[in-house]
């Protein structure tokens, strides 16, 4: 059970589009996608979010020892380039080379660089806002269902 919950927690928000089958992108498009991911500071953002997410997981009552979390974080950091490589493929499958170059141009502007620099913080703040929002709705629903006798108090 703990293992299933851990897997669910670590993969929450990761979706695979149904029926997504595309032709393999050419090397120039892959290179353009790589330039975009670099301009977006994707690896830095992922590492920042990973660190924050794992810190929250450590606090959850999973029953797993601290050495597990330390080892998981270390392994994920080492294997982060493989994830970035996969993201490069994903972007190259969904955008043309011209679109990737245009997006890279946006991230090369002062405001684009600012967005890239703040993306990790924005992602974390958005996640926290979403958790707070959903907890509020769940708490309200729980109270209503308890008043209706559908859930014991």
Image (cartoon, rainbow, N blue to C red):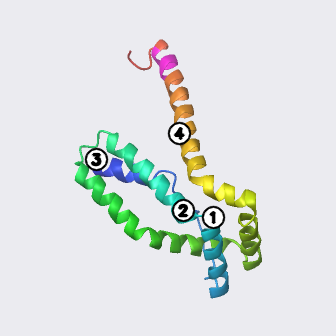
The crowding category of the residue bearing disc 4, from other C-alpha atoms within 10 Å (few below 14, some 14 to 19, many at least 20), is few
Residue at the (77%, 71%) spot, across then down = 102
- Left or right: 77 in relation to 109: left
**CA gap, disc 3 and disc 2:** 24 Å
The crowding category of the residue bearing disc 3, from other C-alpha atoms within 10 Å (few below 14, some 14 to 19, many at least 20), is few
> Which residues are drawn in magenta?
142-146
Q: Nearer the viewer, mark 2 or mark 4?
A: 4
Q: Position of residue 12 (x, y in %)?
A: 47, 51
* Residue annotated with mark 4: 128
Residue at the (42%, 52%) spot, across then down = 51
Q: Residue furthest front?
A: 110
**CA gap, disc 1 and disc 2:** 22 Å
Disc ID at residue 16: 2
Disc ID at residue 2: 3
Do callouts 3 and 1 mark residues in contact (Cβ within 8 Å)? no
In depth, the one of 67 and 64 nearer the eye is: 67
* Residue annotated with mark 1: 40
Q: Secondary structure at mark 1?
A: loop
- Left or right: 146 in relation to 91: left
């Amino acid at each position: 059970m703990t293992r299933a919950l851990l897997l669910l927690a670590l993969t929450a928000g990761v979706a695979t589009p149904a029926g997504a089958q595309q032709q393999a992108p050419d090397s120039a498009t892959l290179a353009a996608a790589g330039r975009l991911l670099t301009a977006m500071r994707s690896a830095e953002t992922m590492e920042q979010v990973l660190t924050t997410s794992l810190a929250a997981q450590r606090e959850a009552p999973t029953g797993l020892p601290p050495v597990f979390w330390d080892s998981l974080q270390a392994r994920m950091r080492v294997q982060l380039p493989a994830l970035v490589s996969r993201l490069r493929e994903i972007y190259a499958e969904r955008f043309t080379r011209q679109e990737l170059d245009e997006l890279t141009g946006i991230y090369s502007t002062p405001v684009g660089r600012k967005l890239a620099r703040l993306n990790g913080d924005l992602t974390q703040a958005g996640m926290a806002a979403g958790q707070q929002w959903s907890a509020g709705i769940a708490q309200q629903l729980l109270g209503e269902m308890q008043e209706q006798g559908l859930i014991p108090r």
